[in-house]
Amino acid sequence: MINPAKACKSGKRFDICSGSTTFIQLAVNQWVLIFALHCKLYKYKDSYIIHGEIEITRLDQSGRIIWQVSARDIFVNIENNEPTFKMLENYIELMDWQGYRYKLSYDGIIVDDVVG
C-alpha cells in the first residue's frame, strides 16, 4: 500500500515515493526510478522536490536531476516533534541531526545555516 503523503498526482500522471525508492511516471507504463533513502515527494511548480534523509533533490518532469543538496548530517530530528523539512514560499527550511537549521533556495543554494 502506498502512503498518500508520499504520492503526487500530476495531471494524468501519478508519481510515487515509497520507502527508499521514488518512481516518476513519464508516460503510461514508462517510469523513471530514483533512489533516495527514506524519502518524501513534493510537487513544486513544474518539478519535484524529494526530501531524503541524506539529501534534498530537485528533479525536472523527465526525472533528470536539477540539483542535489546535503548538509553536515542527516535530515532527522530526535530532539522534539519539530519538522525537519518545510517548503515555504521563498525557500525550504531544513534541520539536521546536529540541530543545524538551513534555508535552502529553490535554486538549490543554502542561503543560511545556523545551529539550533
Image (cartoon, grey):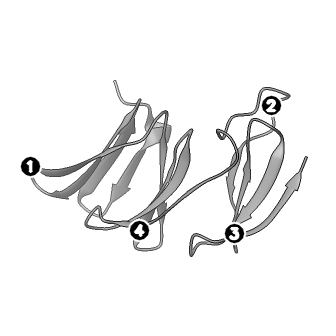
Instruction: Give the residue pinned by disc 1.
Output: 29
- Earlier along the polypeptide chain: callout 2 or callout 1? 1
Q: Residues within 10 Å of mark 3 (few under 14, many from 20)?
A: some
Under mark 2, the amino acid is Asn
Q: Nearer the viewer, mark 1 or mark 3?
A: 3
Q: Answer with left or right where residue 114 lies relative to residue 74.
A: right
- Earlier along the polypeptide chain: callout 1 or callout 4? 1
The single residue placed furthest to the right in the displayed view is: 116
**What is the C-alpha distance between the residues marked 2 and 3?**
21 Å
Q: Residue at x 8, y 49 (%)?
A: 29
Q: Position of residue 41 (x, y in %)?
A: 46, 49
**What is the C-alpha distance between the residues marked 1 and 3?**
34 Å
Q: Residues within 10 Å of mark 2 (few under 14, many from 20)?
A: few
**What is the C-alpha distance between the residues marked 4 and 3?**
15 Å
Q: Are marks 1 and 3 in contact (CB under 8 Å)?
A: no
Instruction: Give the residue pinned by disc 3.
Output: 91
Under mark 4, the amino acid is Ser
Under mark 1, the amino acid is Asn
**Quadrant of the rendered image containing residue 59:** bottom left
Q: Residue at x 36, y 30 (%)?
A: 2
Q: Position of residue 7 (x, y in %)?
A: 40, 44
Q: Position of residue 73 (x, y in %)?
A: 68, 41
Compared to residue 9, the image places residue 107 above or below, namely: below
> In which quadrant of the rendered image does the N terminus lie?
top left
- Earlier along the polypeptide chain: callout 4 or callout 2? 4
- Earlier along the polypeptide chain: callout 2 or callout 3? 2
**What is the C-alpha distance between the residues marked 1 and 4?**
20 Å
Instruction: Give the residue pinned by disc 4.
Output: 47
The single residue placed furthest to the front in the displayed view is: 72
Q: Secondary structure at mark 4?
A: strand
Q: Answer with left or right where residue 25 lies relative to residue 42.
A: left
